[in-house]
Amino acid sequence: MNEKPGSIYEVIGEDKINVLVNCFYRHVSQHPDLIPIFPDDLTETARKQKQFLTQFFGGPPLYIQEHGHPMLRARHLPFAITPTRKDAWLSCMAKALEEADIQDPYRQFMFERLTMTANHMMNTPEDEKGESM
């Protein structure tokens, strides 16, 4: 299956990733700071996120197999990601990690890794909020 032995993915599995992403996008779809930069239909966005998180946490390289290297920062440049939006994204993810019932120390590790990624995605000062393209 191409899992990395001892990986988060090996511990929590595909089902937990799916629950996590579904919970996450339920929160995103209702968050006033995030709605402007996400599409109305989150189906494809959620599918890609499931692929990415599977790979990010040591599972099969589903994202790379279909889309190539993630190049996250470059792929997110068209969207104004302010500190407020980064915090909103992390808030939605923290709620989703809890709702998906991912236990510590895995939840904490996942949130720390995602926090580093979210910090790297910021590309717009707070006073320049842009809308989705």
Image: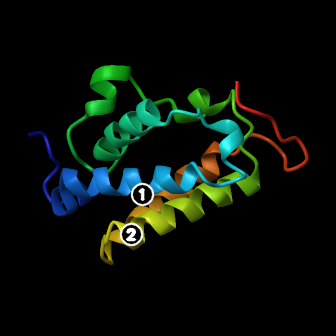
What residue do we see at 36% from left, 57% from top? Answer: 20
Task: Determine whether, in the image, residue 62 is placed left or right of residue 23.
Answer: left
What residue do we see at 39% from left, 62% from top? Answer: 110
Farthest residue to the bottom: give it: 104
Task: Determine whether, in the image, residue 117 is placed left or right of residue 86.
Answer: left
Task: Please rate how many residues cluster around mark 2, counting C-alpha atoms within 10 Å: few if below 14, some from 14 to 19, many from 20.
Answer: few
Is 53 in front, or is 130?
A: 130
Total numbered badges shown on the rendered structure: 2
**Amino acid, disc 2:** Glu
Labelled disc at residue 114: none
What residue do we see at 27% from left, 23% from top? Answer: 65
Is 39 in front, or is 87?
A: 39
Farthest residue to the right: give it: 127
* 110 to 126, vertically: above or below: below
Task: Please rate how many residues cluster around mark 1, counting C-alpha atoms within 10 Å: few if below 14, some from 14 to 19, many from 20.
Answer: some
Q: Quick one: quadrant of the N terminus?
A: top left
Is 97 in front, or is 65?
A: 97
Contact? badges 2 and 1 (CB < 8 Å) = yes
Residue 84, given in percent of the width and then of the height, sits at 75, 56
Residue 86, given in percent of the width and then of the height, sits at 66, 54
What residue do we see at 76% from left, 48% from top? Answer: 82
- Where is residue 64, by image quadrant? top left
Please give the residue where the numbered disc 1 appears in the rendered image. Answer: 23
Residue 39, given in percent of the width and then of the height, sits at 59, 32
Residue 7, given in percent of the width and then of the height, sits at 22, 57
**Amino acid, disc 1:** Cys
Task: Determine whether, in the image, residue 68 is placed left or right of residue 115.
Answer: left
Distance between the alpha carbons at the discs numbered 2 and 1:
7 Å
The disc, 2 or 1, on the residue closer to the chain's N-terminal end is: 1
Q: Quick one: quadrant of the C terminus?
A: top right
Please give the residue where the numbered disc 2 appears in the rendered image. Answer: 99
Is 130 in front, or is 62?
A: 130
